[in-house]
Image: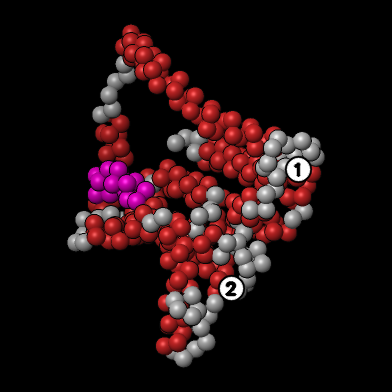
Amino acid sequence: MSNVLMSTNAASSAMPLALPKRGRRSLAHSKWPVLILFLPPALLLFTVLVILPMGEAAWYSFYNWNGYGSPTQWIGLRNYQLIFRNAAFTQALINNGLIVLASICIQIPLALWLATMISSRIKGALVFRLIFFLPYVLADVAAGMIWRFVYDGDFGLVGGIASFFAADPPFWLADRDVAMYAILGVVVWKYFGFHMMLFIAGLQAIDKSVLEAADIDGATGFQKFRLVTLPLLGSTVRLSVFFGVVGSLQLFDMIMPLTGGGPSNSTQTMVTFLYNFGVTRMQIGFGSAVGVVLFVLCVTLAFSYKRIFMRHD
């Protein structure tokens, strides 16, 4: 791969020289007016809309409170004990793990494969990009309602196909052993277009001369992908996995119109568990404790992932 090394050296030699110390100092001073003008309003909004609600939720989690009046019945860590003793919450953790696995093992590889197919200048590539990206544009609630009709055994597409073959219509969303897998299919369909567009952007940023050098060296298509394209897409792949994991932990809007967490809590996620067992039952203290657990889990995973896998990006 001598040509690849030559092109890399040429690219590194073409980098601009560092600014002198006086230029860097003047550039730093020019940023202060922008910081003074825009930073305080942003910090104020972030504090009022994010920090204060988080602190209130953490405070309410220590009370047995129904949301009316002021919380007065202090119960300490009782809400947290009830969370981890709840079988539905355990099922919600398992379901979130399944969604994360489906995102990493199915959704992202599918998006990468499609991106490599349609990133080249083939006829109709833009049309295929639009078609594959359309599911992501749909609102999660709308996607859930569409797929609830598709899965309907009486009037939906799946039921119509079963009737055409003279088979008994399936009711996948009503089967506790199958419902979660049906939701996983919807999740992959809904979000793979987002990851595909990330990979297309990453592929377009790769220097074409590196791929041409690999061709000259006699690399096959799979060798170019494994030894050249995939390493150069490393930062994009890590970013895509990060989005997939964090988004999987927050999945809510799509599940509510599909199953609402049923049947028998078999499709609960942590957010639907918070809504069904906290908000709808007027157990605001318990729901706040679930929110704190979800927040700690998301923050821990996000910072750990960024520190371990994205520290050089």
Q: How is the image coloured?
A: secondary structure
The residues colored magenta run 196-212
Which residue was labeled with disc 1? Answer: 64
Q: Residue at x 48, y 68 (%)?
A: 148
Which residue was labeled with disc 2? Answer: 174
The type of residue carrying mark 2 is Ala
Q: Is residue 255 left or right of residue 120?
A: right
The type of residue carrying mark 1 is Asn
Q: Are marks 2 and 1 in contact (CB under 8 Å)?
A: no
Q: Residue at x 52, y 32 (%)?
A: 49
Look at the image and tell me whether residue 198 can be seen.
Answer: yes
Within the image, what quadrant is residue 34 found in? top left
Task: Say which mark, if any, is on residue 116.
Answer: none
Q: Is residue 235 left or right of residue 84?
A: left
> Alpha carbon of mark 2 to alpha carbon of mark 1: how far?
34 Å
- Of the two numbered discs 2 and 1 in the rendering, the one whose residue sits closer to the viewer: 1
Which quarter of the figure is the C terminus placed in?
A: top left
In terms of secondary structure, where does tag 1 sit?
loop
Q: Residue at x 57, y 62 (%)?
A: 260
Does 264 appear in magenta? Answer: no
Q: Earlier in the sequence, mark 2 or mark 1?
A: 1
Look at the image and tell me whether residue 20 can be seen.
Answer: no
Q: Is residue 197 above or below residue 132?
A: above
| 10 Å crowding of disc 2: few (<14), some (14-19), many (20+) | some
Q: In this rendered view, identify the residue nearer to me: 210 or 60.
A: 60
| 10 Å crowding of disc 1: few (<14), some (14-19), many (20+) | some
Q: In this rendered view, identify the residue nearer to me: 215 or 160.
A: 160
Q: Position of residue 169 (x, y in %)?
A: 51, 83
Q: Position of residue 138 (x, y in %)?
A: 38, 56
Q: In this rendered view, identify the residue nearer to me: 116 or 276.
A: 276
Q: Residue at x 67, y 49 (%)?
A: 282
